[in-house]
Amino acid sequence: MVSKRMIIQEEKILYFWLILGRMSEVATTALDSTPAVSDFARKVEASVIETIEEGTMTKDLTLVCDPPAEGFVTTEGFIKAVRTRLERKL
């Protein structure tokens, strides 16, 4: 049975991905004449996705992972992990 809590958690993740997708879309369409900005947006998006796939995520994301994630970091810890990965790409 699907609980209201599970639905809310899934909505949060979908919202997160929509924001990322929108960032990428804006960078690649509206700012296409600025390749450096488009490139940066793609690197930010890739850094976030890779960080999550690596298993570093906030508690709200661990609750909806399949298989369930064992640990989590604070929002600040997540941002630092994304920053570290992004710095390697730049």
Image (cartoon, helix red, strand yellow):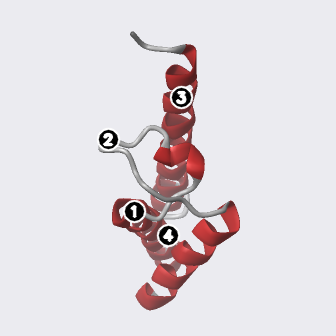
Name the residue type under label 1.
Gly
Disc nearest the viewer among 4 and 1: 1
* Residue projecting furthest to the left: 67
> Which percent across, then down, holds residue 90?
47, 89
10 Å crowding of disc 1: few (<14), some (14-19), many (20+): some
Foreground mark, 3 or 2?
2
Q: Which residue is drawn at 43% across and 13% down?
A: 2
Taking 15 as reference, is 8 above or below it?
above
On the image, which quarter does residue 31 sit in? bottom right
Label disc, if present, on residue 55 of the rendered structure: 1
Q: How far apart are marks 2 and 1 (CA)?
A: 11 Å
Q: Locate residue 26, reporting x and y percent.
A: 54, 54
Pinpoint residue 3: horizontal percent, then vertical percent.
50, 14
Q: Label 1: state its secondary structure.
A: loop
Q: Is residue 54 left or right of residue 7?
A: left
Instruction: Kindly identify which residue carries mark 3.
Output: 11
The amino acid type found where label 2 is placed reads: Asp
* Sequence-first disc among 4 and 3: 3
Whether label 3 touches label 2, CB < 8 Å: no
The residue nearer to you, when weighing 88 against 67, is: 67
Mark linked to residue 66:
2
